[in-house]
Amino acid sequence: MKIAIFCFSGTGNTYRVAKTLCETIRQTDHCDLYALENHLEDADRLIETYDIVGLGYPIYGSSLPSIVFRFIEALSAHQKKAFVFCTQLLFSGDGAAYGGRQLEKKGFVVLWQEHFLMPNNITDLRIFDRRKPYDFARIDRSITKKAVRFTRWILAGKEHRKGSNPISLFLGLLQRIPYGSMNPERLAQSVRIDSKRCVRCGACVKLCPLANLRQTQEGIITQKRCTLCYRCVNHCPTHAIRLFGNGFVRYAYHGPTSGFAIESVKNDELDHTDP
Ligand SMILES: Cc1cc2nc3c(=O)[nH]c(=O)nc-3n(C[C@H](O)[C@H](O)[C@H](O)COP(=O)(O)O)c2cc1C
């Protein structure tokens, strides 16, 4: 069986889960992992060569990052089996089912959905400040266990559709409606850069998944198409960037996996061989 996973990850959490799913599948079957941000236009060509397609993303207000909507919208119809997984800090209600429904509109048969709890990456809001560091070893163990179980269900063809019941849908709506009412266009303009702190190193420009940031003579400017992934906020060396927050980042979040560089996502150095 040939499986492709398309994953978006702002700060590494979703990538961590995707990598474990991919490695587990590879023990018996073929699996390729793609950074969705690098395949916004050509995913159709890739999908054609696989039996099952996986989609992974971080939850934003029980909804999907705008870049993931864009990825799905660009797809043609495919009658392929699919699985969806999302990472979240606390709760999304029907977060994976919501993504599943978007894929179903494109003809996919979504048989598997799962949620994974992961650390928070919103680091410019004081209410989320942490006194204690995360226990990454514990998180790693629980993610691996869940990912391995999820993979077994996929490979065995046993349906598992987390978040598909009416209560989950209701809880999802409780977050999705207020989040949606925040006006996506206004959210896409959310990046604020403090020109006094900014040293114009260009790290944010290089890492942005949507080329939203541009370096000019006047400094970094934004193009109003932010997907709210918090990658620039967490990787700015002088903590000059914020999104929702009322304060600048004090403890940047660089993902759950030691040695993981978000640059490898940007450069599409994930685990795949182009068919
Ligand atoms: C804009 C935004 C909205 C979020 N909304 C939720 C939410 O509704 N529920 C939740 O549990 N976590 C929420 N989170 C937390 C992320 O989903 C979580 O940290 C995720 O694992 C980040 O994944 P990544 O590192 O792959 O980008 C939100 C994060 C961001 C940046």
Image (spheres, rainbow, N blue to C red):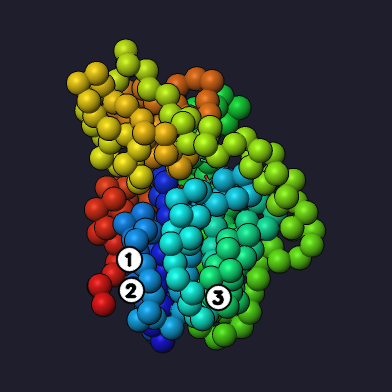
Q: Is residue 24 visible?
A: no
The structure residue drawn at horizontal position 69% and vertical position 63%, both measured from the top left corner, is 163
Which residue is the site of mark 3? 107
Q: Which residue is mark 2?
A: 45
Query: What residue lies at 54% left-to-right and 20% top-to-bottom?
Result: 246
Image quadrant where residue 232 sits: top left
Residue 107 visible in the snapshot: yes
Residue 70 drawn at (x, y percent)? 46, 54
Residue 6 in percent (x, y) is at: 41, 64
Look at the numbered discs 2 and 1 and tell me whether their residues touch, using CB distance below 8 Å: yes
Residue with the mark numbered 1: 42
x 32%, y 47%: residue: 262
Residue 209, horizontal then vertical, whole percent: 35, 46
Residue at coordinates 42% horizontally, 46% vertically from top-left? 10
- Which quadrant of the figure shows ligand 1? top right
Q: Badge 1: how crowded within 10 Å, few (<14), some, or many (20+)? A: few
Query: 120 or 105, which lies in front?
Result: 105
Quadrant (top left/top right/bottom left/bottom right) for the C terminus? bottom left
| Amino acid type, callout 1 | Asp
Q: Could you say whether the residue bearing mark 1 is in a helix, strand or loop?
A: loop
Which mark sits nearer the N-terminus, 3 or 1? 1
